Image (cartoon, helix red, strand yellow):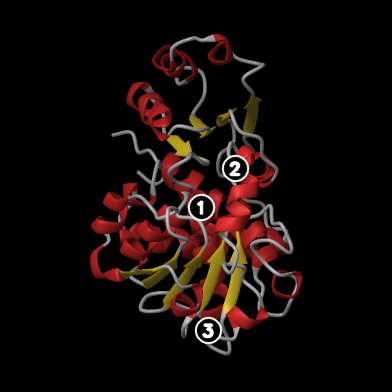
């Protein structure tokens, strides 16, 4: 059976926790210079409708470390960009490569691609979900504070794809998630409801941050929302993660951000560049958690 990774719900909690531990092992192997060419001869197709720094570099580097190869495909490079049906591209590409990674807009498009692909498909970001970032965030928390089960995480800001993935992570990793968004920027109601009592939702960032072990946020205007920037700045006033907000959390609370970040908007420079920030560890861990994911999808049958 072909296994895809379109959301965190596609892998059961036991295997997700195994992935996190394996990512930590692979990171240690790389730091020690131990060879781990586990995917020698394997090829990954990388389809990018949205621009990227961390996603492209981390996946390409992962395949290089594994002894495999990655092919970068932008809309300018493929027939997808000229209107070829997603289903046809899926049928063709999956006969030539061993795994496909897609970074796109509509989540429906990656679901359509996966339905016609004969190889695993990884969601490297859609407008609804960003599960690869959550693997890195969970790995980072575990490295710094141990098991995340039973902890309290606060999401401050937009009810966007990252928020949706944190909701799914609360279900899969069994932690409490406190969400604060401005009115009108709430997460998807169905995704929220499915998580049940693991989620506490409010419109007050200080209330959400109370006694949190980790505070996470994202930009106020994501890719494709640039024309809304001015309005969003007004709506999100008071939702900046600054030193005052961090003080509402536990004394040893961590801060993370999926990047790119806008200092002075969603996060204060003193927080993202301060001692509680694990942002750079989380960015690095995209490489290692995605290695564990690739190994799981291709070799762990």
Is mark 3 in CB contact (under 8 Å) with mark 1?
A: no
Seen at 70% across and 74% down, the residue is 271
Label 1, residues with CA under 10 Å away: few <14, some 14-19, many ≥20: many
The tag earlier along the polypeptide, 3 or 1, is 3
The tag earlier along the polypeptide, 1 or 2, is 2
Q: Is residue 206 above or below residue 2?
A: below
Which numbered disc covers residue 228? 2
Q: Position of residue 31 (x, y in %)?
A: 71, 63
Q: Quadrant of residue 169?
A: bottom left
Q: Is residue 118 visible?
A: yes
Seen at 59% across and 49% down, the residue is 231
Q: Position of residue 241 (x, y in %)?
A: 61, 71
Q: Foreground residue, 39 or 197?
A: 197
Q: Foreground residue, 48 or 157?
A: 157
Q: Is residue 256 above or below residue 113?
A: below
Q: Quadrant of residue 49?
A: top right
Q: Nearer the viewer, mark 2 or mark 3?
A: 2
Q: How far is the residue under mark 3 from the one under mark 1? A: 31 Å
Seen at 60% across and 57% down, the residue is 234
Q: Is residue 205 left or right of residue 112?
A: right
How many marks can you see? 3
Secondary structure of the residue carrying tag 2 is helix
Secondary structure of the residue carrying tag 1 is helix
Q: Is residue 31 left or right of residue 227?
A: right
Q: Is residue 280 above or below residue 160?
A: below
Secondary structure of the residue carrying tag 3 is loop
Which numbered disc covers residue 4? none
**Residue at the disc numbered 1:** 292
Q: Nearer the viewer, mark 1 or mark 2?
A: 2
**Residue at the disc numbered 3:** 249
The tag earlier along the polypeptide, 2 or 3, is 2
Assign the C terminus to one quadrant of the image.
top left
């Amino acid at each position: 059976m072909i296994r895809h990774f379109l959301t965190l719900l596609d892998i059961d909690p036991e295997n997700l926790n195994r992935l996190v531990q394996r990512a930590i092992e692979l990171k240690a192997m790389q730091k020690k210079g131990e060879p781990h060419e586990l995917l020698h001869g394997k090829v990954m197709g990388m389809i990018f409708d949205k621009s990227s720094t961390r996603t492209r570099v981390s996946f390409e580097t992962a395949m290089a470390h594994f002894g495999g190869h990655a092919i970068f495909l932008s809309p300018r490079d493929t027939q997808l960009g000229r209107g070829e049906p997603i289903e046809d591209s899926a049928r063709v590409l999956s006969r030539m490569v061993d795994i496909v990674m897609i970074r796109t807009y509509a989540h429906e498009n990656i679901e359509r691609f996966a339905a016609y692909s004969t190889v695993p498909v990884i969601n490297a970001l859609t407008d609804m979900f960003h599960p690869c970032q959550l693997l890195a965030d969970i790995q980072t928390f575990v490295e710094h504070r141990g098991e995340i089960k039973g902890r309290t995480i606060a999401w401050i800001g937009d009810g966007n794809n990252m928020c949706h993935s944190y909701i799914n992570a609360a279900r899969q990793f069994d932690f409490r998630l406190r969400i604060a968004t401005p009115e009108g920027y709430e997460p998807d109601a169905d995704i929220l409801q499915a998580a049940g009592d693991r989620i506490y939702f409010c419109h007050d960032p200080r209330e959400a941050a109370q006694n949190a072990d980790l505070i996470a946020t994202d930009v106020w205007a994501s890719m494709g929302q640039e024309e809304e920037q001015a309005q969003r700045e007004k709506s999100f006033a008071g939702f900046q993660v600054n030193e005052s907000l961090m003080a509402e959390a536990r004394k040893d609370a961590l801060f993370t951000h999926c990047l790119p970040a806008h200092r002075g908007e969603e996060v204060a420079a003193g927080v993202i560049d301060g001692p509680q920030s694990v942002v750079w560890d989380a960015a690095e861990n995209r490489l290692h958690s995605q290695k564990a994911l690739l190994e799981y999808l291709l070799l762990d049958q």
